[in-house]
Structure formats: C-alpha cells, structure tokens
Amino acid sequence: MPTITYAEAIKQALVEEMRRDPSVILYGEDVANFGGIFRITAGLKDMFGDERVFDTPISENALVGGGVGAALTGLRPIVELQFADFLFTAGDEVVLKAGMWRYGHGGAYRIPLVVRCPSGATATGPEHGQCPEAFFMHAPGLKIVSPSNPADAKGLLKSAIRDDNPVLYFEHKLLYATRGEVPEGEDFMVPLGKASIAREGDDLTLVAISAMVPKALKVAERLAGEGHSVEVIDPRSLVPFDRETIIESVKKTGKIVVAEESYKTLGVGAEIGAMLMENALEYLDRPLRRVAIPDVPIPTAAVLEAFVIPNEEKIYQACRELLS
Amino acid sequence: MALERDKHVAQHALLTLDEAQLLAMYRKMSLIRRFEEKSAEMYTRGKITGFCHLYAGEEAVAVGAIEALYDKDYVVSTYREHGHCLAKGADPRAVMAELFGKATGISHGRGGSMHLFDPDIRFMGGYAIVGGGLPLAVGLGLSIAYKEEPEVACCFFGDGALPQGAFHESLNLASLWKLPVIFICENNFYGMGTLVQNAICQEELYRFAEPYKMPGVRVDGMDVLDVYRAVTEAAARAREGDGPSLIEAVTYRFRGHSMSDPVEYRSKREERIWQERDPIKNLRRRLLAEKRVSEARLDQIDAEVGAVIDDAVKFADESPEPPLEELAKNVYVE
Ligand SMILES: Cc1ncc(C[n+]2csc(CCOP(=O)(O)OP(=O)(O)O)c2C)c(N)n1
Ligand SMILES: [Mg+2]
C-alpha cells in the first residue's frame, strides 16, 4: 500500500470521485488557479477543466447557498472554504439551508453537498484556528466528519461525496503533512458513522478526535510503558455518531477520557458524556474526563495557544487521574 | 476617468498644505514602510508567527486618509492593518509587541497581527474576516449620529470585500440612515491570488456608490495627496450630515498576500511598474522638485523612523510573554 500524506489523500479522493461522476464539481476561493490556499486542489483545474473546478469571489454565503441550490438540481458540489471558521460567515446557508431545506420541504429534495473545512489552530487567532465541529453537531440535518489520518481522509471524503446529504468535512491543517498508508483504487471507502479502534486496550477508553488521535496514540504508548492498556477510539464521523463502539469499549474499561479541540462546554465530550449517562452509566466506574479548550476564544500568542490546545501532557494527566 | 480629472486637484493640495503636514505624511509613510520591512525580517527569523499581511506599497492610502481626519474620528480596518493602526497614532512598540505575541502588545497578545486595536486613539480594530469591518463602521456611524457628535467613522477594506454581502448591506444602511461613514476600498487588484475582474462584475469599484446613492470616486492610491483630498471632502460631507461616501483608492501591495505567499500569480514586470510608483518615493520626489523641503531633512526623518522601529523591535523582543494566569481575563466583563 502506498504511503502518502493526508493532503495527498484528500486530493486523491477528489480526483477519483470527479473522474467517476461528472456531476461532481469543485469551487471556492483560489482553488483553481492558485491551487487552494493549502494547495490541496493544485492541478485539478487542468485535469478537469474550468467548468468543473473554478475560482470564486469571497462570498461564503453565496458559495454554500449556491452549493445547496446546485445540489438540489442534480449536481454534487464540493465547496472549499479557506478556513472552517468561515462556516459562521455562511451560517444561514450551512445551518438553516443545507441542514434544514430537505426536511422543511417534506423530504422532496436531496442535498448532496460537501463543504470542505480546514480546521485547527496554527497561531492564527480566534477566527482562523477553530475546530468548530461541535457547533454544527447541534444542527440537525448535517453530517460531520473529521478524519485523523490519510486513509480515513480519503475514504471518508469519498463517502461524503457519494452521500446524498450535506456533509461538513473537517480537514485538520496540522495533519496535512502527516503520512500513512492509503489503499489505492476507486472502491476504497470508509463509511460515515463507523468509529475506528485505533488501538485496542482494556483499562481505559480514550476517545480522540481529528488531530487529537495521533496525540492519544502517543499517550497510550506511554501508558503502556507504565503497565496500562488504553483503548484509543477515533469516532471519525461525529454525525452520524457510532455510539456502539464507545459503549462496548466502556463496558470493558469502565473509564473514559475524551480529547478534542473544541471548546469544553457542549463540545463533543459533553455529548459523549450525556450519551453514556443515558446508555451505559452502570458500566462507568470513574467519572468521565474531558480534555478540551477552556471556554476562551483561541488566543494568537504562541504561548497562550499552546496552553489552550490540548496536548499530550494534558491528555496523559487526565488518563493518569482515572487510572490511579 | 475620475483619476485623471482630479489629478490637478491633488497637485493643488501640495501647494495648500503646510510644510509640517507634508512632513508628517512623509514621516508616517516612511514609518509604516520601515515597520513592514522589519516585520518581514522578524517573521523570517521566527519572531513573528501565524499570519502576517504587510502593507508596503499601500502607505499613501492609510496616511492620506487618516491625515484628513481628526484624532477623535474612528478608524476600522482589516487584517492588513499595521499601516492604518500606525497612521492613526499607535505606538510602534505596542504594535510590534503584538506581532511578537507579547503581553505588552496592543491587544495583549490575544489578537496578533490581524487584531490590532486601540480605543485611546479610536483605532477600532483590525479584523480577520473579509468584509467584517463594514457592519462595524455602520454601528460606529449610528452611535455618532445618535449622540449627535461631530466625528466620522472611516472604514478601510480590500477589493476582496466587495463580493461579500456585508459590503452591500453596510452601504445600504449607511446611506439609508445618512450615517457619517467613509468607506475606503483599497483596490490593489488582487484578493489573495484572484484578480479583481475575476471576482467582481463591476471592475470600476467606486461605481458601487451609485446604487447606494452616495458619492463614489476613484483616487490614485499611490498618491498621498490625492487620497487626502478625497477623504477631506468625504469627511466634510459626513460631518454636515449628508451621509456616507465610497472612495476607491487604486494601489498595489508590493509583497505577497501574506508572508507565506509565493506570489506566483503576477508578473515581475507588473511588480516593477508599480514599484516605480512607490508612494513614498513619489512624495519625496515632488517635495524636492517643488523645493518644499531639503533632501537632508527627509533623510533625517528616515533615520529617525529607522531608530523608532529598531527600538520597537527591541522592546517587543524583550517584553514578557502573556501570563497564563490571565488566559481567561476579558472573555467577559468582570
Ligand atoms: C470571510 C473570509 N473569507 C476568506 C478569507 C481569507 N482571505 C483572507 S484575505 C483574503 C483576500 C482579501 O483580499 P482583499 O479584500 O482584496 O484585501 P487585500 O488582501 O488585497 O488587502 C482572503 C480570501 C477571510 N479572511 N475571510
Ligand atoms: Mg485586494
């Protein structure tokens, strides 16, 4: 299996799906001539022509709303936002339109739209560095995926493009350069709504999202050295959410830590906690621990940013606390 | 075109301004240029991280406009706002320290290069969402009108903001309510790598004034006096209660969009043509040609400015990091 980067994996998925289905189009700010702000779409215009890959003005509302309109009428648009944070700029189109149009119109339509959202803090401050998945998990009608490695990046994006529902696809900026084995070929897909067990273990369940997964795996390794067996679960898709895998794991371990790059209040961990209260309280022998961003806007200064974004040490400490 | 017609008026401005004003403009432009050059250097040396969008080449717009305002007038800007912030009178030390992410920074290290802010000088903020400043300027205008104050709100934004809904909503509201707002579009031909004509159906950006029933002019954004003249008129109008204006300042950024932009989308030839129109050299040439000031005086200003910026860098470098204990300070009013 070839080893490629997360960025290359995303591009591979785009290329394969655009080859496969002529109704897939891709647009966004600087995606065609410049090749995308993170260079994910470099070369795609030459490959597919400027009818299918094109630049747009800075108009997030019209980009996402236009995507909904095009999706209603048979296209499969992929809209690239330069930063996930701009979902807020396009709030009406994302939440009220992409998420609710089908339902509000009696199910008459399908909205096979993908919005690609580069996420994650890179010293760029409060509105260029968020992982805003949790905001949109609250909104009905949207599917949400956050791959943590190249294979999932590819497989989930292909599934997202083929899905008949609007999908917010969060690609973490700090993962773009990470490498991993990625299956070749059109048929490789990763289903939405299926978690992966990134590492098996019996003593503690560590749920990690997106860029937290590589950190969680290192923590698990470190704890293994101390005699603890940690199971690392990567939900991969947040909506639909694979509750079963987490419940099954907790039945075994009785302890759970959630590591995420969302704000703590009503973050992914909060939802997991509530879900466990409803479904698996009797299996928990320690309280759930959340490692997340304290409820402050992400500060720009490097020291402050490093302090608020969960790191290995913080994840480790949370696990230690439950294991002691 | 408005540009040519008004050129002689700008020449006239050179005659009517006194030496102190002309030198103040020269000094500010020189200060901004030096600040930006140092920022680039510090970015390359890893002292500044994250985004850093430089204003070199566009100095005449910020300086010409802000010199035409009073200290109490408000200024709103974008993420390319080092120049506006300095022109409004911010302390270069505090601005540089912000870029360095230090506790002594103008936004205490919370905002960085894209979020400069200083209420004391009524610099109401850089902001990193394209088009995001315009609605804010409407609110400032509303507040001024409500309190029946004599100020104006001056809002800078790029050509890239015009396709945003926020631009259109803001111009409409400001016009509908006759608010004292001056909208200044810095048309530097590109929004990141995208040319204006690939982003906006009406390339003559000042014409967007017409449907919103306000005066619209295009000025030479490489000519500080041309900008000064247009903003003086717009400010007088706003203060009279006659409402907003739209000014399109045609300019050019000498560097890439940000420090991480390889600038592959434009030609070296194009860059050279615009570099020949360098707004600082331009003013210098004219001041000397008209014998308004000696070369030695201008050199002295450049040297003084250089020292100010060196001091700012030193200050930023030696300043402490923001204390972690204060992380949550200012999320809410206590
Ligand atoms: C809502 C939003 N969309 C996209 C961006 C990313 N972005 C930052 S600057 C920029 C180009 C803006 O160009 P322009 O307004 O012409 O200003 P200039 O950089 O030329 O000064 C883009 C696309 C953003 N910051 N905000
Ligand atoms: Mg521009």
Image (spheres, rainbow, N blue to C red):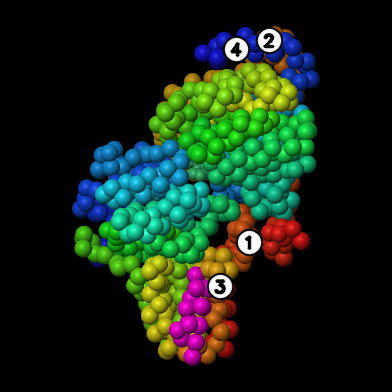
Distance from label 4 to label 2 (Cα)? 10 Å
Q: Are marks 4 and 2 in contact (CB under 8 Å)?
A: no
Query: What x and y, as percent, mark residue A102?
Result: 35, 57
Image quadrant where one finds the C terminus of chain B: bottom right
Amino acid under disc 1 = Val
Q: Upstream in the sequence, badge 3 or badge 1?
A: 3
Distance from label 3 to label 2 (Cα)? 64 Å
Distance from label 3 to label 1 (Cα)? 14 Å
Q: Which residue lies under the disc numbered 4? A: B6
What secondary structure characterizes most of the magenta part? helix
Q: Confirm whether the magenta stretch covers residue A273.
A: yes
Distance from label 4 to label 1 (Cα)? 50 Å
Q: Residue A291, labelled with which disc?
A: 3
Residue at 22% x, 48% y is A22
Disc 4 secondary structure class: loop
Query: What x and y, as percent, mark residue B217?
Result: 57, 20
Q: Quadrant of residue B61?
A: top right
Q: Are marks 3 and 2 in contact (CB under 8 Å)?
A: no
Chain letter of the residue carrying label 1: A
Choose mark 4 or mark 2, whichever is in front: 4
Amino acid under disc 4 = Asp
| Mark 1 residue's CB less than 8 Å from ligand 1 | no
Residue at 37% x, 60% y is A103
Amino acid under disc 2 = His
Q: Which residues are magenta?
A: A268-282
Residue at 61% x, 58% y is A297
Identify which residue, B196 or B103, lies in the foreground. Answer: B196
Q: Which residue lies under the disc numbered 2? A: B12
